[in-house]
Image (cartoon, rainbow, N blue to C red):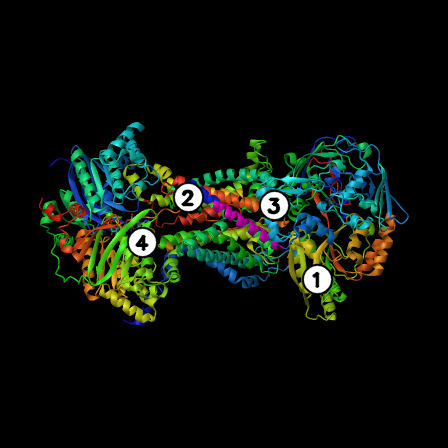
Amino acid sequence: GAGAGSSVSSSGAFSAANCQGGTLRVLDSAKNDKGFDPAVLYTSGGGAIPRLLFRTLTTRQSVPGANGTKVVPDLATDTGTPSQNATMWTYHLKSGLKFSDGTPITSADVKYGVERSFSPQLAGGPPYLRDWLVGGADYQGPYGTGAKDLASIETPDPSTIVFHLRKSEGDFPYLAAETQFAPVPKAKDTGKDYNADPVSSGPYTIAGFTKGRELDLVRNTHWSRSTDQQRLACPDRIDISLGLSSAVINQRLSASVGQDADAITTDTSLDAPTLAKVSADPALKQRVVTGKFPQIFYLAFDLKKAPFDNQLVREALSYAVDRTALVNAEGGTQLAVPSTTFTPESLTAAHQDYDYFPAGATGNPAKAKQLLAQAGHPNGITVPLAYDTDDVNTGAPAATALQQAFAKAGITLQLQPLSDANFGSTVNTPATQPALTLTSWGADWPSGGPFLTPIFDGRQIVSGGGNFNLAQYDDPAVNAQIDKINQVTDYAVAQKQWAALDAQLGKLALTVPLYEEATSVLYGSHVKNAYLDQWRGWYDIASVSVK
Amino acid sequence: MTHPVLQVEDLRVTHPGPVTALDGLSFELAAGQVLGLVGESGSGKSAAALALLGLHRGTRTRVEGGVLLHRDDRPVLDLNRASDAELRTVRGPELAMVFQEPLTSLDPYRRVGAQIATAYRLHTGASRADAKRRTAEVLDRVGIDPGRARDYRHQFSGGMRQRVLIAMALALRPRVLVADEPTTALDVTVQAQILRLLDELREETGMALVLVSHDVGVVGGLADEVVVLRGGRAVERGATARLLGRPEHPYTKALLHAVPRLDAPLPERAAPPADDVLVETAGLRVDFGSVRALGGVDLTVRRGETLGVVGESGSGKSTLGRALVRLQDPTSGTVRFEGLDLASWRGRELRRRRHELQMVFQDPTSSLNPRRLIGASVAEPLRVQGGRDEAELRAEAVGLLERVGLTAAHADRYPHQLSGGQRQRAAIARALILRPKLVVCDEPVSALDVTTQAQVVSLLRELREEFELTLVFIAHDLAVVRSVSDRVAVMRKGEIVETLAAADLTRPQHEYTRALLDAVPRLDAVAAR
Amino acid sequence: MDSQTTSAGTGIGAGGGAAGVWSRLWARRGGRAAVITVGLLVLVALTAPWLAALEGQNPNSFHDTLLNSATGGSPNGAFGGISAQHWLGVEPTTGRDLFARLVYGSRVSLGVAVGATLGQLLLGLLVGLAAGLGGRWADALLSRVTDLALALPTFFFSIALLAVVPQSFPRPLLLGLILSGLGWASIARIVRAETRVLREREYVAAAVLTGAGTWRIARREILPGLVAPLATYTAIVLPQNMVAEAGLSFLGLGVRPPTSSWGQMLSTATTWFQVDPTYVLIPALTLLVCVLAFAGLGEALRVAFDPKAAAPATRRRGRTIAVPPPAPAQPGPTTGEPAARAAAAAVTTLPHEKGEAQ
Amino acid sequence: MIRFLLRRLLGAAAVLLALAALTYLLFYAMPGDPAQLACGKGCTAPQLAQVRHALGTDQPVVRQFWTFLTTLVAGHSFSTGPSTVWCSAPCLGYSYQSDEAVTQMLLDRLPVDVSLALGAAALWLLLGVGTGLYAALKPGRWRDRITNTVILTLGSTPVFVMALLLLMGACVWLQILPFPNYVPITEDPAQWAQNLLLPWLAIALVSAAGYTRLTRAGVLETLNQDHIRTLRAYGYPERRIVLRHAVRGALPTVVTVAAMDIGLVLAGAVFTETMFGLPGLGKLAVESASTVDLPVVCGITLLAGALIVVANTVADLLHAALDPRVRI
Ligand SMILES: Nc1ncnc2c1ncn2[C@@H]1O[C@H](COP(=O)(O)OP(=O)(O)OP(=O)(O)O)[C@@H](O)[C@H]1O
Ligand SMILES: Nc1ncnc2c1ncn2[C@@H]1O[C@H](COP(=O)(O)OP(=O)(O)OP(=O)(O)O)[C@@H](O)[C@H]1O
Ligand SMILES: [Mg+2]
Ligand SMILES: [Mg+2]
C-alpha cells in the first residue's frame, strides 16, 4: 500500500499503557439516523463507531500496516474451528464477558443476535448469512407468533456456538467480524427501537443520542481490557457530532481550534480543495494520514445487451479509457490510483498485476477505433452510461471524464444520472439494468472471495433486485472454481487462487477497472495514535488517544 | 382698516420644467378679512396657497418674492427667507391651512383626536390632559361629537373630515387661515355648512382667511376682496361686490357668464310626447350587501327627452344610471327598454343590442384607457362590431372627433395629453359612435371648469338634436341639470323624492328639493351685497 | 386625410405605446445602463459558441496537463490558470476552460431564469385574470387553488419533482417548468388584486357597453394596465429564479453534466474558495452583475411605464374601495429563505388606487 | 373576527388535505423504492417483498393514503418486531429510515427553525427597515444609491455562498467564533445565541434587501400623500415626519411580509441548515426526500404547509391590526 509509510500519526509519544483520559470529538457527515442496531448495520470489520459498542465473535487486528487485514478473535477464543470441508464452524466464548448492564454474555445471545438479523423489520445487513446458513433462505427471524429459532446455529452450552453452512466457506471467520455476530440479550430486545439504545458489549455505552445530530459515548464499566486485546479505549468520553457538511468537517479539522484539536472524523476524507491547501502547508501536512480501503471503481457491462455482447467492443472501451483524467477528476493522485486489475493493489494478497488492454496513462483511442471497426462499428457507437449522482466518487466528475475520453475514440456516452435512492434499485435489477454502468465494488472483508464472488459467480445472478453480477456472466467452470477456493481455509493459499482467478477473468474484458480510491484524512492537533487500518482504510477509534 | 397680518409681494412660483405656476401675486390681508382667490384649474391657485405657508420648500419648486408675516404692524418674518426652524414655529400658531382633499389630508393610521392633540402640543407644549381638553373643545366647536375623537379618518364622512381639519387649525388659534378649495369635494348642503362655519370662526377669532376656489359662487359669498387668477397672473382684483357686479376684465366677464344659474331663461323646446316611453323601471332595487343603493325606483324616460337626475353624493344616482344601461343587475324590479325586460337579453342578443345603451362617465381620466390612443379608444366600439378595415375605422373615429370639437391630431394622443374637457369630448364621441338610442351621462361635467362645463353642456344639447338621442343626465349641480333637462328627478337615499319639469325646478314641492336649492351659493345675491 | 400614413394611429392601441416606454427607459441613465447590461448578457448567451471559438476553447474538453495532480488537481499557474489560451483560467480537477463554460453557462442560467419567469407570468396571468374577472365561484375556486400553491413548501416540492421526472427529460426545461409551476401563485394574486381594481375603472364599463366579451376586455382593457406591475415584478423574480437554479445545483439537482450553468459553477466552486478564489469570483460576480442589471431594469421599467410618476396623482371623488391586504409574494421556489418575498411585495405597493372603506 | 378565523381554519384544513394528497401522489410516482433502500445492498427478492409488506408499501396508493389520514386523526398501532406500540393522534407514522415517530422527529427539529426564524427576522428587520429609512431620508442621493447597491449585492448572493463567506470569515480567518454547533436555548441561552449568530446573519443579510426596498418605497410613497403635507403645514420637524409618520405607512406591508417570511423559514431553511449543520426541518426534508422516507416527507410537507398557512393568517391579522381601514 502506497499510504503505509505515513499511516501512523506523528504527534508526540504515545503509550498504550497510560493513554486513558480526555474527551475525543468526532466530526462526521453521516447522520446515523438508523441508529445502531447490530442486525441492520452493514459495516466492514465491525465499523468505526459500532466497534465501540459491539464485540463480535472475531474482529480485525488493530495495527497499522498490512497486518491490519488479519482477522483475530474477539468474543471467541480463536477465529473459529472449521469442519473438514469448512461447512461447520465452532466458536468458544472467552470467560468473564459482560454486557454493559452487568449480565454475562452467552452463546445464546450471539445466536439471538444472528437470528434477529433475518427478520424483515430489521433488514439492511449483509446477505451472506442468508446464503450460507442451512435454512437461512426461508428463515423469518425470531419475531411474531409461531416464530422458531434457526436450527443451523447450535448452542450446546453457554460458551459454545456452532454454525452449520450449506456449502464450504473458508472465509467464515471474516464474516464473523460483522456486527450481526454481536450478542443481543433477548430480554432487552425492543425490535425496531433497539437501534436508539442497544445494550453494549464493547468498551463504551451510549450516554446520549439524538439521531442526525449527536451521539455521546461514555465508558462501559463492565468492559475490561483483560478480555479485549483489540481495543485500547483511551478517551473517557467520545462526543460524536453527526450530519455535518464535509466541507465544514475539513475546515474544522484543518483549523483545529479549541475543542477541534481533539477531533477526528470517521467518514470524511480530504476533498480536492482541502488537499490543495494541505499541499501548500507543511504544518497541516503533518496531520494527514493516508490509507486505502480495498475498493475498485469500474465500468460494468451488461453482456446480454448489444453491443457489449461483443468482446471486441468491450476491449475497445478498455483501450479508450483515460485514467489520468479520471484520477484528476477524483482529486488527483493522492485520492485515487489508476488500476488495470479488478482486485485492486490494496487487496494485497489477492492482487496479481495484469494489463491486457494497455491504454497507457491517457488512453489509446486509435486502438479503440480500430477494434470498433473490427467489431463492425466503423462510425463509432453511442451508448448510455448510468452513474450515481449522489456518490462523490462514482458521480458526475468521473462520468464526464469518461465521456470526454471516449469521445476521442468515437464512442458517444449518453450520461444517465441516477439519484442514490434509485441507483441501487435500477442497476441491481436485471430487468432495469443499463447496458453500461459506472460503479464500484468494495470488499466486505479483505479477501478475494467477497470481491469476486458477487460479481462473477453465475449463481449469484438474481432477477428481482440485489444483483451484483452486472455482466450476468455465468460460466460453470468458473463457478466450480469458486466453490473449490471457498473450501480452502488457509488464508494465504486461498488468496493466491483468487488472484489467479481474477487474472484469468480479466482477459474477457467483463469490466473495465478504472482506479482505486486512496483515503487522506486530517485529525486534530492533540490526537495521538491515529492510523488508518488496512482493512477499511479508516481510523480505529478504539485505539485513538487525546491524552 | 386694521393692520395687515400678511403681506404678499410679487410672489412667483416656478415648478421644475420650468412651469411658471404663479407669476407675480401681491396683496395685503388684515385681521378678520377674507381674501378670495378664484381661477380655473391650473391657474396657480394651489401654487399660491402652498407658497403662503412655505410648503414648496424641500421640493424642486422655486419661490420668489416675499410672504411677510406682520405683528404689530411690522413685518417680522419673510416666510420665503426664514430658516426651517422659524418656519416651523409659525406654521400652525400663525398660519394654518385647510386642504382641498378632506378624504386624504388626515393620517389614516392615527385617531383624529390624537392628530389634533399632537399638533396642539407640538406648539404649546401643553400637557396631554390639556391637549385632550382643547381637542374636545374645538371638535365641539366645529360640530363634531368630542366622543368621536377616538375614531379613525375612514369612519368620518367628507364634510366631517373637513371639519376635523378646521378644528385642528382652530386649536392653535392661527392668525391666518388658508383654505385651498375646502369644499370642492363636498355636497352643496355640506358646502354651505362649511362656509358658514368658516365665516363664524373668522368673526369669533378675528383670523384672516384666504379662500381659494374655482367656484366664484363659493368665494363670493364670503370674501371681502377677490383676486381672479389666470395662467398664474392676477387679471383682476377688487372688492367682491364690485368685481362680481361690474367685472372689468374680459376673462372675469367670461368666467361669470359661464357660471350656470338657476334663474337663467330656459330655451324653448317642444316636450316629447308623454306616451312614447323608451325606458321604464318598476320597483327597481339594488343592494350592495347590507347597503341599499336603490330602494324601489319607478321611473320613465320618454323617447327623445332629456331626463335630469340630481341628488347628493351617495343618493344612488350612479347606481340608477348603471342599472339603466345594464351595467348593474337589479336585486329586484325591472328595467324595460322599448318594452322589453333588459334582464331577458342574454348571450348573443345582449352583445348585439348592448350598444343601443351607452354611458358617459364622470371622470374623464378613468373613462378612457390611459394606455390607448384617443383615436383607438373612440374606434374601439366599431372594432368590436367588426366588418370595417383600419382606414374606415379611422375615418369614422376622426369624423366623430371633429363633430365633438376635436381634431384629427387628437386621435393620435394619449388621454393624459388632453385637457379634461377634451377628454370628456372624446368620451362623448365614443359613446355616440354606435348611434345609441339611450345615453346615460353620469356627472359628465362635474370634474370640469365652469367655462369648459358650459361648452360641454352646449355640445350635448346640440348632439341631442342631431343624433335624436334620449338622454339621462345625472349631476349634483342643480343649475346644470336644469339647463339641459326637460324633466328633473330628485333623488335622496336611493329613492326619487319628486320628478318635475325643468321649468318648475325653482318651485319645488318637496322640502328636500327646497333645501338643495337653498344651499346653492347665489352670485346675484353676493353682487347685490 | 391620407389613410395610409395615419392608419397606424388608429391601429392596435392596446399595446400601449412601446415606443414611448422605450424612450422613457432610454432617457434615464440608470435605465440605459441596465438595458445595455442585460442586452450584453443576452448577446453573450446567444453568441456563446462564437465567443468560445474566438478564445479557441470548448466548454467540455479536459486539460490534464494544466493541472497539478499531486495537489488535488488544482490548476497550475496563478489566478486559477489564467493565460492567453484560457482567459478566465481553468476548472480544478478537470482543466475545462472557464471562459467557455461561463459563456455557455449563460445560456442555461438566463434560459432557465427567463423561461421560468415567463412560465410563472403566463400561469399567474391566466389564473389571476380568470379569478379577477370571473364570477364568485370561479374566483373562490381559483383563489383556493392559489392559496394551496402558496402553502406548498415549494423548495421541497421542487426537490421531489426533480427526483420524480425521468432523467432523460431535458434538465433546463424541467427546471424552468418546475420553477414556473411552483412560483405562479404570487403573480396570480397580484394580477387578481390588480384586475379587481382595474375592472372598476370606467373605461372597462365603457368597453362592456360596446358589447365586448370578457376575453376581449381582459386582453384589450385589463392586460395593458397589468404590464407595469408585472414588468417590475419580473425584474425581481427573474434574478431570484437565477439564484434558485444555483441553489438547486448546489444540492446536486441542477443541470446534468457536462452542461455548465452559473449555478453549477458556483456550487462546485464554493469549496475551492481558499485555494482558487478566481474560480469562485467569476461566477459569483457574473451572477451579481446580472442581478443588479435586472434590478436596475425593473426600477427603470417601473418609471418608464408610469409617465406621470412625478406629477401629482389625479384625485378621484366619491365611492372608494376597501384596501385589499397586500398580495403576498413568494420567493423563487428554491431559495428556501425569504429574500425575494419582501422584494416582490414591493411591487404590490406600486401606486394605484388606494381607497378606504367608508 | 371569529368568523374570519373559523373560515380561515376551514380553508387551511382543505389546503392541507390537498397538500397531503399531492405529496403522496408525487412520492408514489417517484422511482425510488423505500423498501429497497431499507433492505440494503444484498437484498433478495423475497426479502424485499417482506420488507414491503412490513412497511405497507405493497398496498395500493389510495389505501396507503387513507391509512395515513386515519392514522393522523385517530392514531394507529405499529409493530416494532417483538411487540407493538400505540402511536396516538396526531400520528404521522414512523420513519422508514430511523424508525422514529415522525411527530417526535418534527417536534425535535422545530425548535431549531423557530430559533433560526426569530433571530434572523429580528436581524433582517433591523437591517432592512434601518437601511430603508436611511435611504428614504435623502432619496436619490449618493447614500441612497450606495445603500441600495450594497443591500442588493448582499441580497443577490445565494444563501449558501453567504454562509460560506461568514464561516470562512468568522471561524477560519478571524477565528472570533467557533464553528456553529446548535445548542438548544433550554440548555444554555448564551451558547444558543452565539452558535446561531452566523446562521442568523446569513439569512438576514440575504433577506434584508427586500425589506430595504419595501421600507424605502413605503416611506417615499407615504411622504407623497396628502396627510404628510398636513403635518408639514403644522410645523412638524421633517425627521419626525419620516421616522414617526411616514414609517407608519410602510409598516403594515413590512410586518405582513415579515410574518409570511418567518413562516417560510420556520418551514425549513435548507441551505442555512445544510451549511451550518443545523438539525432543522429543511435539512430533514431534503434528506428524507432523497431516501424516499414517505412518512417523514408527508409529515414535513404538512407541517411546513401548516406553518405557512398560519403565517399567512397571522400576516392578515397583523395587517388588519396595523391598518385601521382594513376590517376582517
Ligand atoms: N409639481 C409640479 N410640477 C410641474 N408643474 C406643476 C406642478 N404642480 C402644478 N404644476 C402646474 O402649475 C400650474 C398651476 O398649478 P396649481 O396646482 O397651482 O393650479 P390650481 O389653480 O390649484 O388648479 P386646480 O384647480 O386644478 O387645483 C399648472 O399648470 C400645473 O400644471
Ligand atoms: N359596488 C358597490 N359596492 C358597495 N356599495 C356600493 C357600490 N356602489 C355603490 N355603493 C353604495 O351605494 C350607494 C349609492 O351609490 P351611488 O354611487 O349610486 O351614489 P351617487 O349618487 O352616484 O353618489 P356620487 O354623487 O358620490 O357619485 C352609496 O351608499 C354607495 O356607497
Ligand atoms: Mg389646486
Ligand atoms: Mg355617482
Tell me the distance, in whole angstroms, between the alpha carbons under discs 2 and 4.
41 Å
| Main secondary structure found in the magenta portion | helix
Q: Label for residue D253?
A: 2
Residue C17 higher or lower than A190, as above or below: below
Mark 4, secondary structure of its residue: strand
The CA span between labels 3 and 4 is: 56 Å
- On screen, D172 above or below C313? above
Q: Could you tell which of marks 3 and 2 lies nearer the N-terminus?
A: 2
- Helix, strand or loop at disc 1? loop
Per the image, the residue denoted by label 4 is: B332
Q: Which residue is mark 1?
A: A435
Q: Is residue A357 visible?
A: yes
Residue range corresponding to the magenta coloring: D10-30
- Label 2: state its secondary structure: helix
Q: Nearer the viewer, mark 1 or mark 4?
A: 4
Q: Which residue is mark 3?
A: D296
Left/right of residue A334 with respect to residue B116 in the rendered view:
right
Element marked by disc 3: helix
- In the picture, the quarter occupied by the C terminus of chain C is top left
